[in-house]
Amino acid sequence: MGERESSSSSVIARAWPIWVILALLVLALVLWRQLGGEGSSASSGEDERGVADGLSGLGVDEDGFDAGRDGPAPSQVEVFGKVSDLEGKALADAQVCALISARGSAPRCTRSDVEGRYHLAGMPPGEYQVSATASEHQPSSAEVDLRATAKSELDLELLPGAVLLRGVVHDLAGGEVEGAQIRVRNDFLSGDPIDLGLAVSDAEGRFELWVRRGRVQVSAGAPGYSWRLLHTTAPGASVELYLVPESVLIGRVIDEQGAPMAGIGVQPGSGGGTLEFFVDAAGGYAQTDAKGEFRIAELAPGTYRPFVASGRHRGRAALSVKLGLGETSDPVEIVVGRGAVVQGQVVDEAGEPTCVGERLTLTRLPMSRYHAKVDAKGWVEIGGLAPGDYRPSLSCRGRTITDLDELHIDAGDVGDAGDAGGELEAQRWEVASGYPLSGVVVDAAGDPIPGVVILAERQAEPGERLGRMAARTESEPASKSGAFRFEGLVAGTYELQIGGSSGPALDESIEVELRAPGLEGVRIEAPLPGTLRGRVLDDQGTGVANITVSAYPESGEAREIHSDDAGNFELRGLGPGDCRVIAIDGRWQLEVASGEVEILAGAVAELDLEVPRGQGVIRGRVVDEAGTAIDDAFVSITRQAGPLDKGASPGRLSYADAKGRPVLSDVDGGFEIAGLPEGLYTVFARQKQGGDAAVANLRPGKRSVTLVIPAQASLAGVVALPEDAPRPEGALHFEIVAEHAESGLSYEDAWESAAGLWSLGELPPGHYALRVASAWGDAEREVELAPGQVVEDLRIELAVRVRVRGRVVDGEGAPLAGARLRPLIGGRSFDMGPGYVDWVETGADGRFEVSVAQGKNKLLVTGPSGAGLESVEPAIEVGEGDEQDVGDIALTSL
């Protein structure tokens, strides 16, 4: 490492804390599912659309309020500019595309001229993501707001060093899909820049795109199909994406008097009721027509609960809808009432707008989340809100965000503008100005490394508990001179790392102390990296494509790559020392080869990996209970780590689960899956209309397996409180988890119903344990379902929760202030459902009170931050009564 500023010192390298990574992964998954990720209930690949399109929460409400615009919107807009490399040289024949936020829209594309100039005109007003791609250059993209401005100039600089990604888009039968949209992004979780690359498939379904090296997310969609998302690496094997026919959700939106509501944005509500209102406040997947009717297309098979949450309108379908492959729903009715609108501005301590283009999220416990983008003047508008307490959170690149003040919405805040209590005062979310931290990132030769993101993790002071948003932030990509900058970090100790899934990595993090007035001149010098090249070969010496090769060096970060079509791989940016290399067949998550190699700084090491060529075959038939063949059933397979005691586990199969081309049963119900390595497998089958089957503990061989899909059962009824229990204000909000005894799988949904009505459909027959959870009470029931049985009148009465008190102490019996705890109801942590109970913190005397369900439960208890105490999960049994004392809970040292 080169010399650093005196305020910097090196520390032992370590990965980001696992809780940070898990939190980011959970957030990404939720965003992915709600915006339509692969295998979710929404249209696959919509995570690319939701992020790439730059959806904003600002819109004109009934009063004409629009914090982000001045004057009438133009009828048509245009964007123009120049595409160049980092040296300012014009890039001719670069493809430039503008993608509007409207769902289902196709990008508008053109090519740059010999001077690198482009011009896109005649487009409707909106927010656009403009992306440029060129041969041997990495994609570059930026957002431009063309709602109030008729034209905008936008220049784009492209980094060198791209690799070529090739692929083909198929339909479910294997035919080519022409004109499919392909969207490619790198891995933002590891700190890659979030630039978007766009392509369109040709007449043979093929596409090519120059992309940044590393992990990539490739999504594809076309009219009449649901979107599909695939994770791979670049370089790597050619990408194959198989699109399935779209499922369609139709319905009508009416007001509380039954009148149709026109021009209302409707969201599909992926996942049913368990993930409520996790939405952009910009509109919806579809707008209602003059009759209040809507049609949401390009959805993947799955469960939906469509809803409205925008402006002063909110409402939701009473029950979830399950859509099969290519199925159109029966009409769904959404009754819309009034919701509150929150308007506010994000500013720094000087009152200046900040965090422009970032997202502000309002979370209403237990499970509702709304988010919108901060506009150029710092304003945010989020509508469709119900009464309750909301926690604001804010993402803001380059700044450390401390917890923001919570927001409370009264019932009187929900109403028409002008009504008494019908409007909320504008909010002001103040972000600490903090101090700047800047520097330069260079390679071992001292040359700048442009385009990399610097990650900064603040270290907690002794006894300090960092807020929800204060742990980690990142810089904008470094400039062509390698300069990076954080605009406003709070004082403290930070560990700096170079982000990215394939770029240069530090042997150890850099620790800096940030104090007033800031810190400049930090020098981050990447060590001279090593490179590993090789081939993945079978026992005949033939290259094997699409094997994941992961390298774990003694120093620096682990790296992974997929072998290309000829079996070649190359891993860059490896730290020096002994390196363990593992090859994994991603179809089965099976380690198929491993090796050891020494990596030298600045040198290229070579290693070939021999993997067994799978020769096994599993074949069988898919039938119903009468033995009648089921054609076009979707068949998938997973490799087991060992024998399964409970046998098969149906109920979780998604069309996105298949790696490569999906397997469909033929007209006789037959199927065959070849190329399997030795081992145990579970085979799944799902028919288009719903219902599935699974057989476990299978070995490849000559024996044929029969998968019987039974007639599906259903449960419905009412959840009620005891007559003498206090009544909740408004509707009862509850969740039901039905655990299938034979498979151990759970089926769940959530409802908000004044009458307590609920329904669970498409259940395989068998014995079920039902667990009902709500903020007011809980219940348990067991039920046996025969094939095709319909139960419509199951009444479940809740037992009211009990206040439990106690004290948390250390190993010596001294009270612990600042310890945190929450109940695990029935052994389950209800993190976002109606059964959610928030963390509580002990007072100075170590005492606490928390609401706990009756019956056998556990408490999850953690010590004060930085205290070095082991967490415990003491079992408690709660009987009837207003309050109970569980005594002292002791935490011992780690």
Image: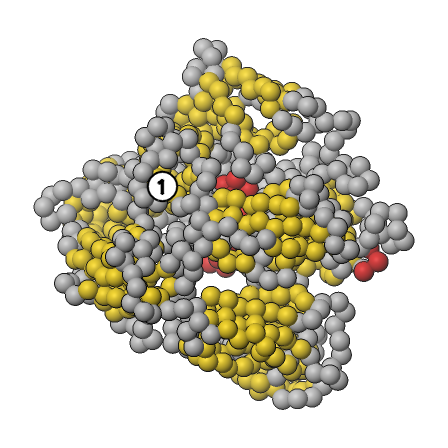
Q: Name the residue furthest top.
A: 114
Q: Is residue 126 above or below residue 232?
A: above
Q: Is residue 46 above or below residue 39?
A: above
The amino acid beneath tag 1 is: Asp
Give whichever of 481, 452 is nearer the camera: 452
Q: Quadrant of the N terminus?
A: top left
Give whichever of 133, 213 is nearer the camera: 133
| Res 349 → quadrant | top right
Q: Position of residue 126 (x, y in %)?
A: 64, 31
Residue drawn where x is 38% and y is 23% of the image:
135
Residue drawn where x is 37% and y is 69% of the image:
710
- Left/right placement of residue 656 relative to residue 276 reads left
- Left/right placement of residue 521 relative to residue 762 reads right
Q: Position of residue 669 (x, y in %)?
A: 27, 58
| Res 3 → quadrant | top left
Q: Position of residue 211 (x, y in %)?
A: 39, 32
Badge 1 density bin: few <14, some 14–19, many ≥20, Cα 10 Å: some
Give whichever of 522, 556 is nearer the camera: 556
Residue drawn where x is 81% and y is 46% of the image:
426
In this orientation, does residue 218 appear?
A: yes
Count up the numbered dots. Answer: 1
Q: Which residue is mark 1?
A: 171
| Res 531 → quadrant | top left
